[in-house]
Amino acid sequence: MPRTVIHDHDGHVDDLLSCILLWLSPEIDLQAVGITNGDCYAPQIFEATQKIATFLDIDGPEIAVTEDEVPNQFPDNWRRESYIINELPLFEDNYLKKPYQQGRPRRIDSVFLDCLSNSKMPLTVVTTGPLTNMARLLDAHPELKEKIQEFIIMGGAVSVKGNVEEPGHDGSAEWNVYADPIAFKQIVDTKLPIKLITLDLTNEMPVTKDFIGKLEAQAERSRASALAAKLWSLVKGFDYYFWDTITAAVAIEPGLFTFKDIKIDVSTSGKTMGRTSQALFGKKVQLATQVNKQGFEDLLLSTLSIR
Ligand SMILES: [Ca+2]
């Protein structure tokens, strides 16, 4: 039976790719998608997601949007990628078809609340952005914890340096945690099972030319592959890694990964704000330490070839 999932993401190229993977995978029943105003402008990515669904002729999850700003906002020049994604020429013939979802999207907390409270089976929550929405939801409705089987979270940097380069910060934090460190701490403090995918693992997984070549080779007969190749081409020239796509793969095929139980602590203030470190009295998480690289690339290529 497929695993029931809700996906909360923050709208960058990698988030959309991970969302597409979860949406297409036969192993996953994707119930809802939340678009957070993190590494994007959420209304733009809502429109883009509608276009993606039409382009790939897929349906299922309700798409929700929360436009509240996260405590530490992502750099504007990263977020502006949203406009380019939303205007991709690939979507031009979409206007002939009716939009995936009518009207204004509902807020993420309302949609996730409905999904979790109506579900008979506990769900998996995949997050590839800040934890703001989930922390607020569980704070307001602690009874929903029973409805969560586990979290699969892209966030943190334990034994490697972070990717935050902000004035007054020492660079030790990873952006998803730094964006809302208190929310991350609240989720870790719930003691719900957490599989954590940090920069320690993703640093070893650059998006290679070789992989893009294989993707382009199957693009002629696969719209999802053509779209994925287009999305990755937008970030050519940057050091781009499989971050969120790896996180989606943990939900789809956990057997590709090796995990180790560690205790972590998160800094919520000062120049180390958002730093995640191993600590004797921290909270237990399952840290993803290794991935079967070939298996992971094969999974991406085969999942994208579905459409
Ligand atoms: Ca993200």
Image (cartoon, rainbow, N blue to C red):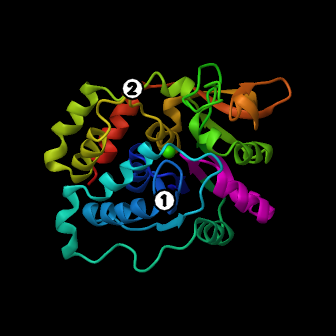
In the image: residue 184, left or right of residue 288: right
Report the residue at 54% width, 29% height from top.
163
Which residue is most to the top? 159
- Residue at 46% x, 46% y: name it: 76
Q: Residue furthest left?
A: 220
* Rendered location of residue 186, percent (x, y): 77, 47
Q: Helix, strand, or loop for circle 1? A: strand
Can you say whether 56 is above or below 164 in the image?
Answer: below
* Identity, as a three-letter code, of the amino acid under mark 1: Asp
Residue placed under numbered mark 1 in the picture: 29
User: Is residue 123 shown in magenta?
Assistant: no
Of residues 70 and 222, the one nearer the viewer is 70
* Dot 1 crowding, Cα within 10 Å, few <14, some 14–19, many 20+: some
Total count of labels: 2
Mark 2 secondary-structure assignment? loop
Q: Earlier in the sequence, mark 2 or mark 1?
A: 1
Q: Residue 167's x, y, as percent?
A: 60, 31
Q: Is residue 4 visible?
A: no
Number of residues whose C-alpha sits closer than 10 Å to that of mark 2, classed few (under 14), some (14–19) or many (20 or more): few
Q: Is residue 61 above or below residue 305?
A: below
Question: At x 59% / y 41%, what residue is drawn?
Answer: 176
Determine the CA span between mark 2 and mark 1. Answer: 28 Å
For disc 2, the marked residue is: 206
The verdict on residue 142 being magenta is yes
Find residue 178 and report its image quarter.
top right
- The quadrant of the image that shows the C terminus is bottom left
The magenta stretch is: 125-151
* 290 shown above or below 70: above
Q: Tell which of 57 and 87 is nearer to you.
A: 87
Q: Residue furthest right?
A: 281
Q: Which is in the foreground here, disc 2 or disc 1?
A: 2
Q: Quadrant of residue 120?
A: bottom right
